[in-house]
Image: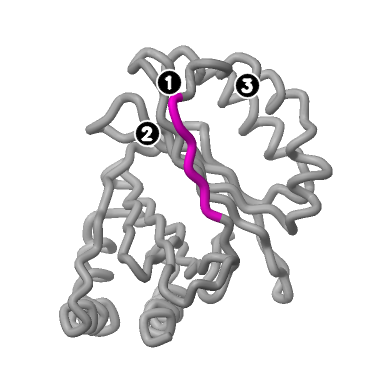
């Protein structure tokens, strides 16, 4: 897939500069051949960029300052990607999300790692639900950080929609998710508190096809 190749090239450029973000290229495990994902974190703006292309992307980026972000966007590989998207008539749908303080961590992945990745979009029935549930979500993040096979966990809110919460989760494999993480007490308590507050939930199961998910 040309888009996957181009995004992977961007990740290689990113990897050469310690001041530029984490960047992972992810693909649906269902293998539809059309969908990639990217989630980008911009520390200076305190925002995460959740970009949906149609053949989409999901990576995790962290920009230390505005100059680093500007330099990344102006790079030849990124500009070539924009030109390519115009050529195939793809317009990304971009959501700017707020990064929740103390609700994100990442760990190193081994060179031969094939992590199982989950992105979720939760919509709550009332806009007071997320502030009410943040302590429970914080407990989930803290417990997840202690789990050897939970490699990344991030929670993000939508400044334009107070009922939405997004999570990005990376596990060493699906078996670890189902056998350890999903059975944790903190997750069970969060689910109990969430209960009838959730209006809808969408998720995507993904694999890493390029780039990297942690910078030490």
Residue 190, numbered label:
3
Image height check: is 128 above or below 157?
above
Q: Which residues are magenta?
A: 199-204
The first of marks 1 and 3 along the sequence is 1
- Magenta span includes 94: no
Image height check: is 48 above or below 157?
below
Residue drawn at (43%, 20%) of the image? 130
Residue 88 image position (x, y, % from top left)? 22, 82
**Left or right, residue 129 beside residue 212:** left
Task: State the CA–CA distance, disc 1 to disc 3.
Answer: 12 Å
Residue 157, numbered label:
2
Q: Main SS type for the magenta part?
A: strand
The first of marks 3 and 2 along the sequence is 2
Residue 158 image position (x, y, % from top left)? 31, 35
Q: Secondary structure at mark 1?
A: helix
Q: Secondary structure at mark 3?
A: helix
The residue pinned by badge 1 equals: 130
- Residues at circles 1 and 2 in contact by the CB criterion of under 8 Å: yes
Categorize mark 3 by other alpha carbons within 10 Å: few (<14), some (14-19), many (20+). Answer: some
Image height check: is 13 above or below 105?
below
Residue 100 found in image quarter? top left
In the foreground, 216 or 14: 14
**Left or right, residue 197 beside residue 95:** right
Residue 163 image position (x, y, % from top left)? 35, 25
Residue 81 image position (x, y, % from top left)? 26, 80
Q: Secondary structure at mark 2?
A: strand
Instruction: Return the residue found at the far right.
Output: 179
- Residues at circles 3 and 2 in contact by the CB criterion of under 8 Å: no
- Residues at circles 1 and 3 in contact by the CB criterion of under 8 Å: no
- The C terminus lies in quadrant: bottom right
């Amino acid at each position: 897939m040309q888009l996957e190749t181009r995004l992977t090239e961007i990740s290689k450029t990113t990897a050469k500069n310690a001041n530029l973000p984490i960047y992972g290229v992810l693909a649906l495990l269902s293998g539809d051949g059309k969908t990639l994902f990217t989630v980008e974190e911009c520390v200076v703006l305190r925002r995460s960029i959740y970009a949906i292309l149609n053949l989409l992307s999901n990576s995790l980026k962290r920009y230390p300052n505005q100059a680093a972000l500007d330099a990344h966007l102006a790079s030849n590989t990124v500009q070539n990607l924009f030109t390519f998207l115009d050529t195939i008539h793809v317009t990304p749908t971009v959501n700017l999300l707020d990064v929740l303080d103390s609700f994100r961590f990442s760990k190193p992945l081994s060179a031969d790692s094939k992590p199982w990745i989950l992105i979720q979009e939760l919509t709550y029935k009332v806009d007071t639900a997320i502030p009410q549930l943040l302590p429970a979500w914080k407990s989930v993040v803290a417990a997840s950080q202690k789990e050897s096979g939970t490699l990344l966990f991030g929670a993000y809110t939508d400044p334009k929609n107070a009922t939405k919460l997004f999570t990005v989760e990376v596990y060493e494999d699906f078996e670890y998710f189902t056998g350890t993480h999903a059975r944790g007490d903190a997750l069970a308590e969060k689910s109990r508190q969430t209960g009838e507050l959730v209006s809808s939930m969408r998720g995507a199961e993904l694999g890493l096809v390029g780039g990297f998910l942690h910078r030490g």
